[in-house]
Amino acid sequence: MKDQRSNCFSGSPSVNPFFFFVVAAAFAYVLIVYDCHPALVVTGVTKSEPSCDLFRGNWVRNESYPLYNASRCPFAEQGFNCLANGRNDTDYMKYQWKPEECDVPRFDPKEALEGLRGKRVVFVGDSLSRTQWESFICMLITGVDDQKSVYEINRNGITRQIRFLGVRFASFDLQVDFYRSVFLVMPGSRPRGAPKRVTWTLRLDEIDDINKKWIDSDVLVFNSGHWWCHEKLSRAGLYFNNSMQLGMPIPSAFRRGLETWASWVDANVNKTRTRVFFRTFESTHWSGVGGRSCEITLLPSKEMGGRDKSFVTDTVLDVLEKMKTRVIPLRVTPMGAYRSDGHAGRWSYEPAVPDCTHWCLPGVPEAWNEILFSFILSKTKTS
């Protein structure tokens, strides 16, 4: 369509009052759009947000992958470095996610570092969130000349147990943090007088008490889901401490907890500064009787096998749609459904206990991050 901005002030010097109405209306529209869809102001980047569905597509082989070497990245934990742990094949690292109707921009570490200069990025969630955080950092560090200028701020090693990890890119005044909050709501101790089978509680109406440490950020990336299962809750003696019955269904409890998180976001997040994302459930590939078998394939599966569906993902998308704050869903569930080749398997912390939940690094999480970068390095359209 022809750009008509050059004609705005042409013609007679006398101006119809309707002109002022149009200008005022347009100005108000811009203010509303900026308030509802805040842009992350980045240096030298003028891209628009992706206009197609980035999460509907397929995995294609790309010999230029992987994007980094986990053995050369000090922030990739040993348990996810499958190659170093004895995995012989490398095909699982050679796949790129290809949306049906467009392309995910190729990751450029130099551009990303400049775009994030002076920013704070925060990941909040479970161990899958930590995996994405590690991948995010390993991708960025490939663009840093002096890698000694990148360090964990408390000089901590990357472990499963620690609740906070923060990596600083000193040359870019950039910090990328991870906070472990597997439920996003507040865990608690066993209530007095509770049945013996109850050992701990989950306060579904109260956000995790470390929430104040998440606020001061430019990008917030949340996830939750893998702990909302019978094995980790009911068998562990969980009690939903909310004046609710002991046998409350887990999907109902998850929705209640997520609504608490959503209310917190709406009430506390600075909409003019912070962009918020929520990553949906990451597909697992457990099989066999009781879902206790873990068989890693050499190549991605051709079928999703029903793994593209999850009550967690459905609940997340429903809750996000009702929020006042714009939260961008990272709908990775169908993406991971194909990747029966990408899990840590027996090349993890405990070779005798295969892992069909977590992912090898590098591998699937880079696809999540390439999509994430395409959003956070974009400039939101205002017209």
Image: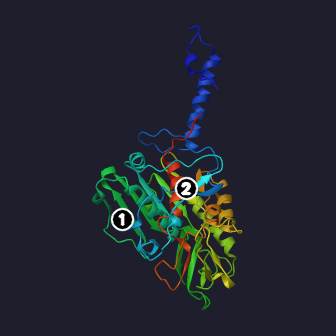
In the displayed structure image, the side of residue 340 where residue 155 appears, left or right: left
Q: Which residue carries the number 1 mark?
A: 72
Quadrant location of residue 75?
A: bottom left
Mark 1 touches mark 2? (CB < 8 Å): no
Q: Could you tell which of marks 1 and 2 lies nearer the N-terminus?
A: 1
Residue 156 appears anywhere in the view: yes
Nearer to me, 355 or 309: 355
Q: How crowded is mark 1: few (under 14 residues within 10 Å), some or many (20 or more)?
A: few
Q: In which quarter of the image is the N terminus?
A: top right
The color scheme shown is rainbow
Res. 303 mark: none
The image quadrant of residue 293 is bottom right
The x and y percentages for residue 74 are 35, 66
Q: How far apart are marks 1 and 2 (CA)?
A: 29 Å
Judge by depth and name the residue closer to the eye, 77 or 267: 77
Q: Is residue 27 above or below residue 175?
A: above
Residue 146 position in % (x across, y down): 28, 55
Can you name the residue that lies furthest to the bottom here? 196
Amino acid residing under circle 1: Arg
**Which label number is shown at residue 277?**
2
Which is closer to the viewer, label 1 or label 2?
1
